[in-house]
Amino acid sequence: MAFSCASVRLHGRVGAFKCRAALATPSGFSFPGARRWTARGIHCQLPPRASADGVDATTSGADVVVPEAGEFAGSAEEVAAVIQPTVFQQKGGEVSDFVGSGGNGKFPPGGGGGDGDNGTGGGGADGDSEGDDEFGPILSFEQVVQEVEKRGVSFPSLPADMIEAAKNVGIQKLLLLRYLDMQASAWPLGPAVRSCGLLRNRMLVDPAFLFKIGTEIVIDTCCATFAEVQKRGDEFWSEFELYAADMLVGVVVNVALVGMLAPYARFRGGSASAGLLGHVRHAYDALPSSVFEAERPGYSFSVQQRIGSYFFKGFLYGAVGFSCGLVGQGIANLIMTAKRSVKKSEHDVPVPPLLKTSALWGVFLGVSSNTRYQVINALERLVEASPLGKRVPAASLAFTVGVRFANNVYGGMQFVDWARMSGCQ
């Protein structure tokens, strides 16, 4: 058939008067929590001091009166005179300064509740350790500007989402350096990276992204060509237009299969757009690119999100398969009908049903190809993260070629079975 199965393609803030209590705590003692102190007209006298001749003397000073809370609430100077800052010493000798007026103090590491500005949540480490993964630390706005100017690139020439991220939350160092290297590449890579965000964001996370697409296209084209020659025999050249249409649609499908599951850089910091499209975009960005995508600083994925990603990618794969089936099989059917109107043969096979064949492609991509490529992505990530993959990058590339070749062969045989069971062939 023209859109050949043998192509194998488808694959606690407390108030202003709180923690700095006038309590001289013993060394090494820490309070479990800060308490609000309210003085309620406490009156006391100093104990009498004995005189030299043994006669009790009166107190050496006037009575000490702690004023009512309302009396010193209006004067910051009086409050400061009564309450002096106290350092609470933590375990291990670390000192944490709990500032009562507004959460600017430094808290002990390890108890965070997420990034409040970005709503990412799920983090247990403090902000200083965020970004400490294979992509390096997060550079501040000033550091980003310095690094960009050091490379001879003007900061305004960066992509808009990277500029917004640099101003708000920063950019991880390795991602920035990779972009500066790739945008300086020769044609066509350099202009493509600067102008196409889909390509740029995927290559920043996975520099082997184009290699994987190329591998998929070459393997699929070679397998499909071999199958087409065996199937058509002496009529291969007379039906070359069918083969060409098949290969063209196959390229589109291969790019979609690899690109949709590829991890990509998410630059935070931009304001969320309102409306339905804004909510859809937010929900899409919250999902991992594939079921087994690795977590990164600021982006952790729950089990529900990973399951949702599987079904969402299956839907996208199905839509691509149905659309490409309509185009590819439609072209093939038109050519077959035109040729038979000129010359008929008793050996002619029936023209495949267009909608039924397109639906088969959609189901096959959404179920079989989606599952197989999810597994392939997980295996490639394991190999790339292994000590061997890090020491010998060629081993990861060789594994990519081998596993994708095996997937193409198995997928092609599976599609033949599906096509025969459905009656399309």
Image (cartoon, helix red, strand yellow):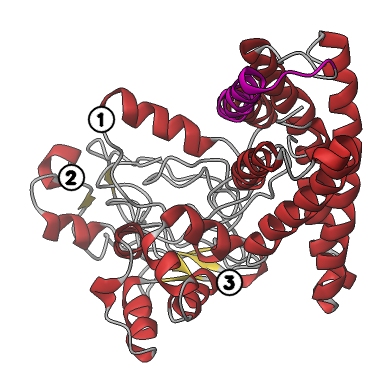
- Picture quadrant of residue 109: bottom right
- Give amino acid for label 3: Gly
Question: As rendered, which of 242 and 246 lies closer to the eye?
Answer: 242
Q: List the residue tagged with mark 2.
A: 67
- Give amino acid for label 1: Ala
3D distance between C-alphas at marks 2 and 1: 53 Å
What residue is rendered at 45% in x and 76% in y?
A: 187
Dot 2 lies on which element?
Answer: loop
Residues in magenta, as a range: 323-346
Screen quadrant of the N terminus: top right
Where's residue 172, x and y in %?
Answer: 50, 68
Seen in the image, is 96 located left or right of residue 260? left
What residue is rendered at 59% in x and 23% in y?
A: 338
Where's residue 264, x and y in %?
Answer: 55, 53
Question: As rendered, which of 276 and 171 lies closer to the eye?
Answer: 276
Q: List the residue tagged with mark 3.
A: 136
Where's residue 175, x and y in %?
Answer: 52, 69
3D distance between C-alphas at marks 1 and 3: 32 Å
Number of the front mark, 1 or 3:
1
Seen in the picture, residue 89 relative to 16 is either above or below; the reply is below
- Mark earlier in primary sequence (2, 3): 2
Q: List the residue tagged with mark 1.
A: 274
Seen in the image, is 254 located left or right of residue 178? right
- Mark earlier in primary sequence (2, 1): 2
Residue 348 on the magenta span: no
